[in-house]
Image: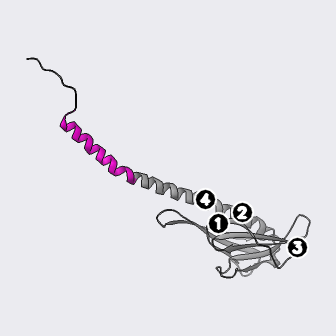
Amino acid sequence: MKTTLKKGYTLMEMMIVVAIMGVVVLAAPRTFIKTYQFVQLLTARVEIQKNARGALANINRDLRQAVATSIVVGAVSGQPPHSRITFNKYNSSGAFDTVSYYQQGNKLYQAIAPGANVVLPAGKMIANNLRYIAFTYPRTDDDGIISISITFEKATYEGGTKALQMAVEKVRVMN
């Protein structure tokens, strides 16, 4: 008796393939969603770290050059307490410039006016996604040290946010 081989798939093989494809189809969307969420969190973290480092570097540089007796900590109307700092610093010609850093909504602004002006021009935005900034004196016996606390946040997915809190302690005013 001779047997002939037929080409094709058995019913059992087809059922196994359909079951495997069902598992893959059910798992794929969840994997894609988790990957998307991970990328959103990573992007938010990188962006707020960049904003925080840049803002703190600007503030640190200018505050170190400030005249200690000219520093005034306050707030713009409607903003959190201690969210604005204004001071005089020497410019390249040896005269004073008035510098101010302040929070307005969720943005951080820097305003510079030549001379010891009381009225500062509208500032330029140096960082966005700011949640909170505070300038304080960590020691009552030394007005040459300023503490800066800053928090940034960015929306991620499904109404969530990623926040980063940074603090720079003891920025020493050199003048």
**Disc nearer the start of the sequence (1/3):** 3
Secondary structure under the numbered disc 3 in the rendered image: loop
Give SS at disc 1: strand
Crowding at mark 1 (Cα within 10 Å: few <14, some 14-19, many 20+): many
Q: Quadrant of the C terminus?
A: bottom right
**Alpha-carbon span between mark 2 and mark 1:** 15 Å
The span from disc 4 to disc 2 (Cα, nearest Å) is 15 Å
Relative to 161, say whether 78 is above or below. Answer: below
Can you tell which mark lies on residue 57?
A: 2
Would you say the residues marked 2 and 1 are in contact, meaning their CB atoms lie under 8 Å apart? no
Amino acid type shown at disc 4: Glu
Name which of mark 4 and mark 3 comes first in the sequence.
4
Quarter of the rendering containing residue 97: bottom right
Tell me which segment is drawn in magenta. 9-30
Instruction: Return the mark for residue 128.
Output: 1
Give percent across and percent down for residue 58: 74, 64
Tell me which numbered mark, 4 or 1, is placed earlier along the sequence: 4
Nearer to us: label 4 or label 2: 4
- The disc, 2 or 1, on the residue closer to the chain's N-terminal end is 2
Q: Which mark is residue 31?
A: none
- Identified by mark 1, the residue type is Asn
Which amino acid type is marked by label 3? Gly
